[in-house]
Image: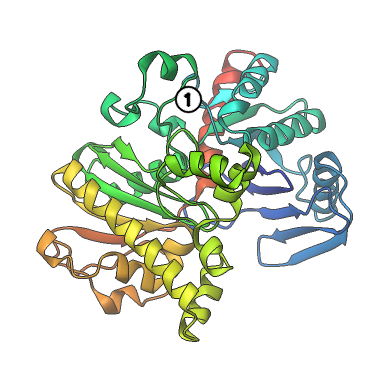
Amino acid sequence: MSYVLVLNSGSSSIKFQVVDPHGHTNDAPLVSGLVEQIGEHSGAINVTLRGGEEIREELEIPDHTYGLERAFEIMAANKVGPTDVDLIAVGHRVVHGGIVFSEPQLIVDEIEAMIEDLIPLAPLHNPANLDGIRVARAILPDIPHIAVFDTSFFHALPPASALYAINNEVASKYDIRRYGFHGTSHEFISQKVAQLLDKDPDEVNQITLHLGNGASAAAIRHGRPLDTSMGLTPLAGLAMGTRSGDIDPGIIFHLVRQAGMKVDEIDTLLNKQSGVKGISGVNDFRVLREMIRAEDQDAWLAYNIYIHQLRRFIGAYMIILGRVDAITFTAGVGENDTEVRQDALFNLEMYGIKFDKEANLVRSKEARMISTPDSPVKVFVVPTNEELAIARKSAAVAESAREAGLY
C-alpha cells in the first residue's frame, strides 16, 4: 500500500499525517502527530498510531529540523517511518499561492524561490511553510515534494468578487486582490456535499462554512467559487478565534494617529489579540461555552458578535447565489458546536431552511444532514479532511512527475 506524508508547518509547530491517498474520508491515517513549541524552552512531540496508541515526548526542540527528524525517529521505532512504508510523495500545505499558483506544484528550487517571493502576501504563514519544505526536502531528497496551496480553489473568482474598489494601478502593482483561504477544505466539502445530494457538483449551489480557530465562508455555484470571506490575507471576513475579521480600515489609521501604534503592533493586535479571544480572553469554544453558562458577559458578547458576523455572510451569500441547495458546517467549531449551528440558522424558515434541532444534537464523525427531509435548503455537517485532499492532489502530481522521468 502506498502513502503520502502530509506536512503542515507553522511558525512553532509541525502537524503531520501519513495518509493512504486512495482511502476513504473516514479512514484513520497510518500515523499522525504534532511537533509543538519549536524554539521554546519546553516542547513536545505527539505521535498517534493507527489503532489509537499515543506516544509523547517532552523535550526542547530548537528548530524545525530537529523536531521533524525526532518525529521520524519515533515513527521508525514503530515501523511507520518514511523509509518503512511505500512513501510516494510528501504533500506540503502552503497558505498563499498568490496569482501565480492555481494548481499543486512539484517543488523544485525554482518553485521554492517563488513561494518565498510570496512572503509579503502571507508574512505569518509562508515563511513557516517554507521551513517545513526545506527541512523535509533535505531529510527526504529522493521523494517528490508537492506544494498544495490554500488559495488555489479561489484562483478563478469572478472579478467583481476578487477585486477591491481601490486604485487599479496600486492594486495591480502590489497584487492586491481577494485570494481566499481554506480552499482545500471548501473544495473537499463542496464535492462531498454534491455526493450527499446525489448530484454532479456542477448542478449544486452551496454555502460552505469552515469554522475553526480560523474561519471562512464560501459561496459556490455549479462547483466553482463565486465569493469567499477571506481576502488578501486570512485576516478578513468572519470574526475568528484570535482574528478580528472585517473591520473599518479607518481603525488602523486611528490607532496609528491616536494610539501611536506601529504597523507590527497593529498586525499582532488584529491577528492574535482580537476576535473571540480579544473580547472574552479565550479562543477555545468549549471554554467559552462554560463561561457563558457562568453568565460571563464578555463571553456572551464575543459569542453574539461571532454569530452576528456568521449570519451576515450566510445572508449575503444566499442573495449572491440566488438559489441555495445546501449549507454545510465543517472544521472544529462547525463540526462540534451544536449551538453555533443552531444560532447561525435560527428562524430562517422563510428562506427555505428548516432546521432539525434533534438531528443537530447527534454526535457523529460521519457526514450527516441536520435539516428536515422536506427542507428546500439542506443543511449538513461534514467533517473536513484537508490532509486526505492534500494527499490525493500530491499523489496525482507525483505520479505525473514519475511518468515524466523526473523521479
Residue corresponding to mark 1: 103
Residue 356 percent location from the top left of the image: 23, 73
Height in image: 266 above or below 381?
above
Q: Nearer the viewer, residue 164 or 220?
A: 164
Judged left or right of residue 237, residue 343 is left
Task: State the residue lying farthest toward the front.
Answer: 258
* Amino acid type shown at disc 1: Glu
Quadrant of res 163: top left
Residue 272 percent location from the top left of the image: 60, 52
Residue positioned 50% across, 22% down in the render: 101
Residue positioned 35% across, 77% down in the render: 361
Residue positioned 42% across, 20% down in the render: 171
Res. 194 in view? yes
Residue positioned 50% across, 86% down in the render: 294
Quadrant of res 89: top right
Q: Nearer the viewer, residue 308 or 155?
A: 308
